[in-house]
Image (spheres, coloured by chain):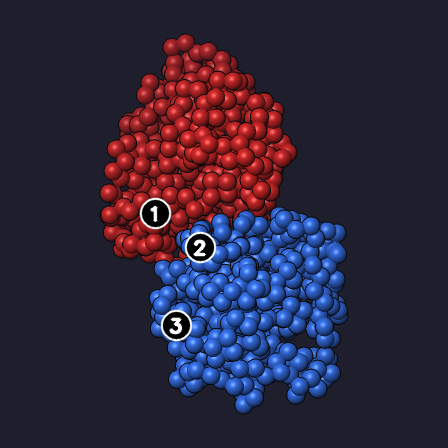
Amino acid sequence: MLGLGASRLVSLAGAAPAATVAVARCDAYAPDDLAGAFDRMFDQLGGLGRLVKGRTVAIKLNLTGPPNVRLGRHPAGEAHWVHPRVIGTLVHLMDRAGARRIRLLESAYCTAIPLEEYMYQAGWDARELARAGRRVEFENTNWLGRRRAYRRFDVPHSPLLFPSYLLNPSYSECDTFVSLAKLKEHMTAGITLSMKNCFGNIPTTIYGDHVPEEEPDELPRSGRSGVFHRGERQPSRPAAPEVDPTSPRDAGHRIPRVVVDICAARPVDLAIIDGIDTMSGSEGPWGEGEVCHPGVLVAGRNCVSTDAVATAVMGYDPMARAGTRPFEECDSFLELAEQAGLGTRDLSRIEITGTPIREARFDFAPLTRGRRPRSQPSRASDPNDP
Amino acid sequence: MNCEPWIPMRWPCGPLDIAEGRRRQGFTVVEADALERWSAPETLEILAGTPVNCLVVTWAEGSEGDGAHQQAVAPLVIAARRRGLSVVGWVAAETDLRAAAASARASGLDALATESSAPVPGFDVLRFRDLGIAERSPVGFLGVVGAAWPGLKVNLDSFLDAQSGPTGPPWIDSNAWYVRLARDLLRPNSIWLSFDPDETGRPVPAASYVLAIADSEVYGARWVISLDPHLRLGLCEGKPSARETWAAITRGVTFFGEHRAWGNYRPVAHLGVISEFAGGKESLSLEVLNLLARQGSAYRVVERSQALETSLDGLRAVLFLDGAPPDAVLVEKLDTFVREGGTLITPPGWEERGTLQEDAWPLRFRVLRHGRGRLAVAREGFSDPPVLAQDARLLMSHRHDPVRVFNAGAALSHYCLSKDRGSGVLHLVRFVSRYYRMPVTAWFRRAWTSARVWCPDATEARPCERKVVDSGVEFSLESVPEYCALEVSA
């Protein structure tokens, strides 16, 4: 299932970098608990100041799907969105560590409204996030916004699906790029975590289902499944078309490759995963599933290693191949990323600090009864599905 | 004549309706059979025990067949009268209304209904018109033809469940905006909406009928019930599925009859929309209202000619839609509104005053601080209703939303308060949802102390669990059908 590109990538796997990953138990979203846990984790990773002091920090949030959708009665932050107190705490800690500017980024579902407005619709108070630091900015990266032109991000290794991606310039106008994700599964990609979160970097003004192929449409109105999941069309010009238009049109083949491409093109400097309250079975309420309480936080400098540890915390084997849990119907983006040299998924090569995996482990597999058969991933997945 | 107590139902039958059907492409055997059988007086038995008390029958179209038709339906009319039902005769616009009235009087009809404006002394006529507000003279009764069958735009060709609107979410056909506009501008005692189900070759689901009732009643109108031919024939044949659908319809009508008091509640409004609703910007202004209603925006209509006399109290923003700037007196009133903290949204041409806010959204506006409020002047003339409706909502900010509903799917929400503001009702008309099995949650900024949910298919209201959250309260409605009303109390 890995396709023709696999053989030339395997050689890079052994050289894939390994980095420390910090794991912490955290039972609730109480600000003091969060601050204490993150403080310890960042110390274990070498200190937050090294990463943010005097820098512009961009944090890609995971706010997938419409803001007025909940898993049952649970507010989005308790299920499929990263919790607002996690965001606020991180903003506070980064500000305290000397960040010059902190920018909160997300490509809001089907819309170009300001990110703060998107948050208000979910019942969040964006002003509280803004007050958590001295200079906090919000940007909906689903479109160009105030910028003049999209920024092209080339995939440095042999691209797996597209040679480059056009993104909102916010993803380049930062010194430190943070992927702040949720510990959850994904109907198409198996798991979400910090790498899959970056799928949401991509603007639907260019890669959306209904945009003209001649040029972007600055009024987002759809998801991206036509270009990415089903491969039934190419993005708007001037975005580059995919490398091999004869490659499989199956979402289980394509989405893991986009994830690896995008993480290679816009590397993650710090991966943070909120696994305190989350959901199993899917990336959002549209896939049903149920809420769960792993009570854990995971963070690391390397997104592949961080996601590998998080995968293990979820009770899955990060070395799992396509066809086995949690990648029953898709390729493993962890494996593809390792082969591309982005990082190792081999737990024996990763230094894990803080709470050992065996103590943090929370098995998702028994909870995934809500998961739909992976044979229908492209229709079942939400179009904006980090 | 007071037609307010009438619950009308279209009763198609007889030679004229059959002939009209045969002239139409796609007229089916089912339709013909239904029309034949529906003229039998026994069919009135289906109305027993229902609130429907007024038949609307075709009466005249100005053809040679009028007499034969009237003779054919006479037994039905007599039987209806015996049952205490009112009977209204529908007369085509070009017909000699006096002659139709004479025959109607002789046959015992209560009134005529027509789009004709011809005078008819001595006989009651319910005047219908096309969906529009070109004619502004106040009316006691407003009948409307050409209203939309409420629902989601379905694209059967592409096998998609719904077509996206210009802003992404599915496109909903609804008459809500029009009813609200007509009530504000024309102030009729009664609004009847006449629209028929689309002929799809299949029976219309009961839920669609409930939506048709709710989409009218919630906003203060009454639907002239119109059944699809499959249902009419099914009822004649006593089919259980037809009976179930009919029961759902009558439950819906009964429900709104039992909650007439909600009709006196006032919509919560944060946005005032000022326009002539006529002239060059008429279609834009009407479409903006349509979209604001679909967004669930808390708005109210202010006719430009009445703007000086209309209080802007309680509004956070005013959207001045017309291209022609207001006169000096209205400018002064709006300027005061802004200086006291309101937001004025205008097309270009408004004298810009205040201090420019460099970082303001949306980009299509120059936003200026003025007094305690803001002036948002569009950089270009208003032209795109979806964009304008969204921009207006953003300029007010979702931060101030009085209510938010989660997991409602493609739905209309309408939030109203009693005159003493001690209670309220949130109507929820759900057109479709991927999340039907998900419990719906309603958040209110106001900390209502209790809430109960009413559904037409339940005899009693169900209390809702209350949860205090940041800046408001939430009530869990659990799983609710295509329409429900959440009644909240202080």
Question: The disc labelled 3 sits on which kind of residue?
Answer: Gly
Question: Which element is circle 3 on?
Answer: helix
Question: The disc labelled 1 sits on which kind of residue?
Answer: Phe
Circle 1 packing at 10 Å, graded few (<14), some (14-19), many (20+), is: many
Residue A139 against residue A61 in the figure, above or below: above
For the residues marked 1 and 2, what is the alpha-carbon distance in whole angstroms?
24 Å
| Location of residue B288 in the rendering, given as x and y in whole percent from the top left corner | 53, 35
* Mark carried by residue B444: 1
Which chain's residue wears label 1? B
Mark 2 — residue?
A131
**Do discs 3 and 1 share a chain?**
no
Q: Colour of chain A?
A: blue
Which chain's residue wears label 3? A
* Mark carried by residue A36: 3
Question: The disc labelled 2 sits on which kind of residue?
Answer: Arg
Q: Colour of chain B?
A: red
Q: Is residue B424 visible?
A: yes
Q: Residue furthest bottom?
A: A348
Q: Quadrant of the N terminus of chain B?
A: top left
